[in-house]
């Protein structure tokens, strides 16, 4: 943790830190002892939080019939936006939601945290990171599905969603309204505090620490960490003030870029040390079941690995419920198949790559070095300048986390204080200013408190998901049955959201509406199928006269209506040639 390096600033920052520590240390320690309470089993201390999350992960994996395996192929098409329309309710695409959630989970925990886990638990910890990551896929799936199912679409088309809504609305639906309101309130409070601490204060502090680590004492930024905080805050403000759409667009660029950069670097490390790869895998598997040299043996290794995986992918925390609630879709189950990739990428891919880089270079035997130093030393085996790329990756990871958690906290604030633009603006300004605070002083006690609040989010969230398990199962398995039967098909290519498209232009919107009219006319025998096919072959261009005729048909049809703006809207019972209803393939 860092302090202001100017003499006057150092005294003031240190005094403020000491005041915070003296004031909050006792209650924070008390809360930490509850959240991370551990019981001794097999010579190791096992936090009950880990047991709670692993039990939920295992339950949903089995209860949902191993969807991470059976639904894998379908999930790829969903990520590519083939099953959702630009006109669907929501604000972002499935890929953008995936990128937003990954930007919040892939970060220092996957780099420095894995290094620490391996030094504490040995190479075998990597095996349990993979196992926990695979099991966490179903838990993320559950959060995303419920996030979409119980979201609320506001009059302006924006989305109010997140675990608070499926806890409140979902439990009300199954006859537990009081329990639902209580769990939703608890979650919103924990989320408001936890996201500011874990997603803002900690990230800003660590990004600043990394950027100033090798600077001379006389350097301006080394003496004035607040300046780095201001730069981060300004860059973040340019995105955060634009709302979820702007955040999603930015993370859709940053997440693939930083992931490719980091994976490319680790592959270079492995290429240089390729002769050690077979031995690295042998150590990972062997030590996973022997616990050689680790306190608590096998149990101790498993606890270290599982804890790191759960902390790195945030399965059970509920953040996927925020990110995916904003997606353009009318089928809640689809987002579950997208979200299951998040723990896989965060824990199975990124964490495993980090672990292999550290093990193949022999850095896991080093003592006294922190996580980033170990990873940096591993990367230095390729070239002396390679750690600079690691610094860049870590900074990008930290910055993207600040962006995604801004939206999560904003949703919690809106739930607590009302869905008002004023609430959103005040929260965003506060969140941006906190970045400067996080970069400037240590705030160790505040970060500890925020971490405790962050993982307290798992209690109301997972409990609510257990209550909603039957609803969740029907949603997911029902969708899978419809996909298998062929009644759920990809949307027309011109209407698919794709990876980044969100809104239809006027021409595409008119073409979609006329297509729905013509499909209905074919289905009811009003026109011949060849007429529809000829129009499609001509590029589906719509003249003013043709659109006017389509609008006249809509007004006289029981399957369509025309709104005040003149837009044609298909009702839920509108028949089409592709077996769709309401303009949406089912």
Image (spheres, grey):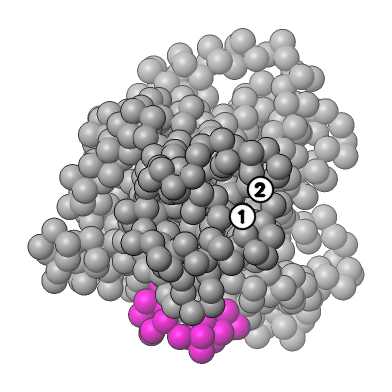
Horizontal arrangement in the rendering, residue 194 relative to residue 171 (left or right): right
Tell me the crowding category of disc 1: few under 14, some 14 to 19, or many 20 or more residues within 10 angstroms, Cα based.
many
| 42 within the magenta span | no
Q: Kindly indicate the quadrant of the structure image that contains residue 420.
A: bottom left
Query: What type of secondary structure mainly makes up the magenta span?
Result: helix
Do residues under tags 1 and 2 come within 8 Å of each other at their CB atoms? Answer: yes
Residue 278 visible in this rendered orientation of the protein: yes
Extent of the magenta region = 405-429
Residue 47 visible, this angle: no
Could you tell whether 357 is left or right of 100 in the image? Answer: right
Q: How far is the residue under mark 1 from the one under mark 2?
A: 6 Å
x, y percent for residue 202: 57, 63
Residue 25 as seen in the image, left or right of residue 122: left
Q: Which residue is mark 1?
A: 511
Asked whether 32 or 6 is in front, the reply is 32
Q: Is residue 171 above or below residue 500?
A: below
Circle 2 is placed at which residue position?
540
Q: Residue at x 65, y 85 (%)?
A: 12
Task: Please name the residue shown 51% across and 37% down the image.
Answer: 529
């Amino acid at each position: 943790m860092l302090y202001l390096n100017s003499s006057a600033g150092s005294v003031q920052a240190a005094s403020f830190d000491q005041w915070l520590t003296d004031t909050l240390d006792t209650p924070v320690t008390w809360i930490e002892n509850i959240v991370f309470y551990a019981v001794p089993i097999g010579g190791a201390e096992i936090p009950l939080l880990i047991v709670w999350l692993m039990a939920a992960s295992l339950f949903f994996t089995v209860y949902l019939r191993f969807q991470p395996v059976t639904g894998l192929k379908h999930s790829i098409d969903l990520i590519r936006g083939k099953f959702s329309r630009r006109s669907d309710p929501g604000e972002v695409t499935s890929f953008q939601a995936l990128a937003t959630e990954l930007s919040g989970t892939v970060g220092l925990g996957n780099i420095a945290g894995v290094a620490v886990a391996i030094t504490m638990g040995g190479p075998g910890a990597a095996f349990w990171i993979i196992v926990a990551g695979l099991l966490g896929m179903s838990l993320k799936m559950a959060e995303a599905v419920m996030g979409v199912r119980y979201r609320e679409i506001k009059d302006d088309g924006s989305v109010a969603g997140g675990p608070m809504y499926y806890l409140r609305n979902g439990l009300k639906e199954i006859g537990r309204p009081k329990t639902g309101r209580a769990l939703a309130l608890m979650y919103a409070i924990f989320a408001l505090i936890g996201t500011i601490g874990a997603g803002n204060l900690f990230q800003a502090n660590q990004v600043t620490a990394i950027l100033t680590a090798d600077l001379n004492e006389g350097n301006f930024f080394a003496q004035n960490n607040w300046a780095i905080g201001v730069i981060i805050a300004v860059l973040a403000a340019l995105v955060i003030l634009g709302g979820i759409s702007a955040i999603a667009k930015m993370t859709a660029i940053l997440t693939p870029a930083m992931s490719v950069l980091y994976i490319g670097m680790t592959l270079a490390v492995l290429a240089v040390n390729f002769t050690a790869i077979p031995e690295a895998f042998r150590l990972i598997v062997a030590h996973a079941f022997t616990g050689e040299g680790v306190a608590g043996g096998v149990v101790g290794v498993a606890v270290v690995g599982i804890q790191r995986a759960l902390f790195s992918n945030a399965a059970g925390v509920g953040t996927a419920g925020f990110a995916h609630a904003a997606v353009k879709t009318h089928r809640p189950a689809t987002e579950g198949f997208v979200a299951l990739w998040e723990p896989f990428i965060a824990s199975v891919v990124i964490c495993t790559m980090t672990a292999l880089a550290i093990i193949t270079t022999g850095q896991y035997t080093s003592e006294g070095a922190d996580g980033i130093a170990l990873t940096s030393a591993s990367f230095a085996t390729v070239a002396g300048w390679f750690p600079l790329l690691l610094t860049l990756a870590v900074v990008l990871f930290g910055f993207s986390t600040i962006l995604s958690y801004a939206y999560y906290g904003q949703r919690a604030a809106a739930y607590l204080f009302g869905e008002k633009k004023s609430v959103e603006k005040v929260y965003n300004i506060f969140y941006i200013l906190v970045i400067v605070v996080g970069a400037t002083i240590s705030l160790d006690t505040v970060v500890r408190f925020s971490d405790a609040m962050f993982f307290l989010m798992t209690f109301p969230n997972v409990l609510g998901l257990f209550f909603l398990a039957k609803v969740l199962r029907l949603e997911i398995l029902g969708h899978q049955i419809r996909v298998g039967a062929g009644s759920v098909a990809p949307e027309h290519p011109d209407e698919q959201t794709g990876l980044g498209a969100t809104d239809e232009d006027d021409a595409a919107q008119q073409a979609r509406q006329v297509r729905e009219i013509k499909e209905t006319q074919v289905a009811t025998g009003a026109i011949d199928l060849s007429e529809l096919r000829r129009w499609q072959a001509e590029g589906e261009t719509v003249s003013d006269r043709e659109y006017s005729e389509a609008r006249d048909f809509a007004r006289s049809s029981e399957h369509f209506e025309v709104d005040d703006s003149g837009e044609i809207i298909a009702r839920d019972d509108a028949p089409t040639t592709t077996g769709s209803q309401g303009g949406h393939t089912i």
